[in-house]
Image (tube, rainbow, N blue to C red):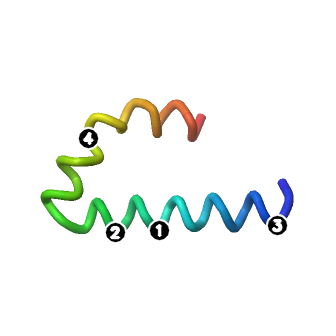
Amino acid sequence: TTEEELARCVSFGNKLGALAATKAGALTALPYYDDIKHLLK
């Protein structure tokens, strides 16, 4: 992967972490959980 792709993945992970840090954020992210798991395979 290029550094740009890596940075994008890290940014995406940080956003997910921030969302998951709150109950409302976790509920908001829940519908996308399967999509996220698919991306991480």
Question: Which type of secondary structure does the marked residue at label 1 adopt?
Answer: helix
Q: Which mark is residue 36?
A: none
Residue in view at x 30 percent, y 62 percent = 19
First along the sequence among labels 2 and 3: 3
Please give the label number shown on residue 30.
4
Residue type, mark 1 in image: Asn
Residue sitting at x 39%, y 30%: 34
The quadrant of the picture occupied by the C terminus is: top right
Q: What residue type is labelled 4?
A: Leu
- For marks 3 and 1, the one nearer the N-term is 3
34 shown above or below 27: above
User: Which residue is disc 1 drawn over?
Assistant: 14
Q: How far apart are marks 2 and 3 (CA)?
A: 22 Å
Q: Find residue 2 and report its horizontal and vertical position in percent.
A: 86, 59
**Which amino acid type corresponds to the residue marked 2 in the rendered image?**
Ala
**Helix, strand or loop status at disc 2:** helix
* Residue at numbered disc 2: 18
Tell me whether circle 1 and circle 2 mark residues in contact (CB < 8 Å). yes
In the image, which disc is placed on residue 3?
Answer: 3
Asked if residue 18 is positioned above or below residue 5 in the image, the reply reads below
